[in-house]
Amino acid sequence: MLFNNATNTITLKPDSKIFAGRTYYFTIVVKEKNSDSVKYSFYATVRVEGEINDSETGAYNIGDNDVDGITQVNYTIDYVDDKGLGSLHFTSPIHMKWLEDHFQEFFNIYWRDTTYRKSKQDLSLLDFKPTLFSEDAKTINFTLKFSKPYRIGLLVKKSDRLHIDIKMDEKVYGALGNLWLGDPLTYEMGNKADKIRLEMIFDFDNEVMSTFRSVAKNMYWVLIAVIVVQFIMLSIRGVGLLPVWVFIEYLQLVGFMPIYNFRLIPYLYDAFKPSLVAHMIIFDDTPFIEDMDTEYFNKNYENYWLSVGKLFQSFFFVCLFLALLVLANIVVFAIHKCNCSNATLSGWASRMMTQFKFNAYIRYYMLVYFDTTFFSVMKIMDPNNDTVARKAALLLSYVLFVVNIVLPVFLIAHINRRFDILAMKEAKQSFNSLLLKIDKASRWRIMNPAYFFARRLLTAMLLTLPIENTFIFLQYVFILMSSHAYILYMVAVKPY
């Protein structure tokens, strides 16, 4: 082999003739100068195409896998998915029954992690089991298990790889003819090894993974209990509900963090999952529409187990809570108008009517703002609008998206217009949900709600960017910039 530094080309000098139609596999080894130690090794494949007609060797009719009457058989690992399921495919039919009986003796199966270049260590699997030898005599499905699957496939620039090699020892080499369906002299193996990149593995039979998943399922109900108890206790004490609102609002931001374009250790997806209760996502399997639980916006959503069905749960509860809010308003309005003889009840109804005009609706809007914006943008980006229902949903999405841009601007403009009289209780009580615990002595301080709406609007838009989008990096930029900007605002203005 000769390497030309000027042209960066490698010239190979084979020991025997190169035949058209064949694939040749070899390893390029780079050694230290004046030393036998290996510095780098590269695997290479050369496919020789075309036909030859040599007077010394005779005429050859070259097909895709047929050279001088010899059928060349190659095998490849088709895929290994995130559940540890995979497939091995041969280019020509083979003796499946014989391979089934001698599978472990025939193949050497191992994997290499991202540190292989330093460690030079082939790692064994916890289990590798062929599950199906297909009737076409070409495909073998298999399952594999790792002792620590949550450590695999986390890096983008470096790869963990599964290797399936033929054990070319004397025993296997002598039995190789049993693999063919025809005359053993008319077949040969085109390759003796194959490998494939391993993506993240979500093996929930693993002890660590199953523990985190079971804890996540229980934490759904724990967080719901915390929110309900906190709401009741703060209402009884009459000290205001700001702590519970802040708790829910930050759970909403945390709940969608795993669907940003970065990779988490697989069991950490379940650590974040209980936060979805802040988006009113409660059930793992959506009732009545189970088929929608198999649809996902992109791969990150599938890793997080956040299906279209679960997003529909959130939308359903948004509508349900709005209906309950309107119903409660109607009941309080009826009590207020009936001039009840009970002074305590009448006074309570009068205070509640003040809250329903418009504090209760503003607080509801602030709680559902992130979700409604997120759903609207997702539907707008969805290209599937064939049915009448989908077209109606698209129209509703445009309406909600425009409202979620215009209404916050109107609310912020309204409190700025009334800034001079905000010190009066009667002047601010109808929209005090926007200004809870905020010092009204400066216009800069009452701009705090503007940050609330702006951050959620941009976050919802960035979350729906496709993974392959050129501007996907803006997700990282916005997370950092928005958080740092708010810290600087809090330090400089001290709104609370």
Image (spheres, rainbow, N blue to C red):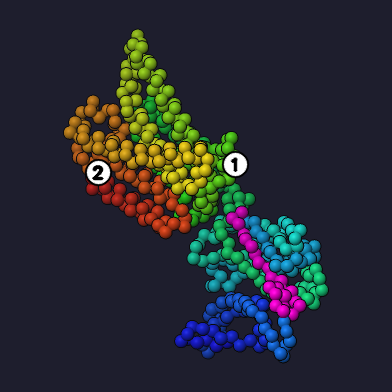
Circle number at residue 494: 2
| Screen quadrant of the C terminus | top left
Find numbered disc 1 in the image and state the secondary structure of the residue it sits on. Answer: helix
**Mark 1 burial class by Cα count in 10 Å: few <14, some 14-19, many 20+:** few
Residues rendered magenta in the picture: 61-83
Locate residue 84: give its quadrant: bottom right
245 displayed left or right of 7: left
Residue 82 colored magenta? yes
Asked if residue 318 lies in the magenta stretch, the reply is: no
Q: Residue furthest left?
A: 420
| 294 to the left or right of 485 | right
Label for residue 18? none
In this image, 351 relative to 467: left or right? left
**Circle 1 residue:** 291
Camera-nearest residue between 226 and 467? 467
Q: Badge 2: few (under 14), some or many (20 or more) residues near its Cα, within 10 Å?
A: few
Q: Please give left or right for residue 388 compared with residue 112 in the image.
A: left
Report the residue at 37% width, 44% height from top: 456
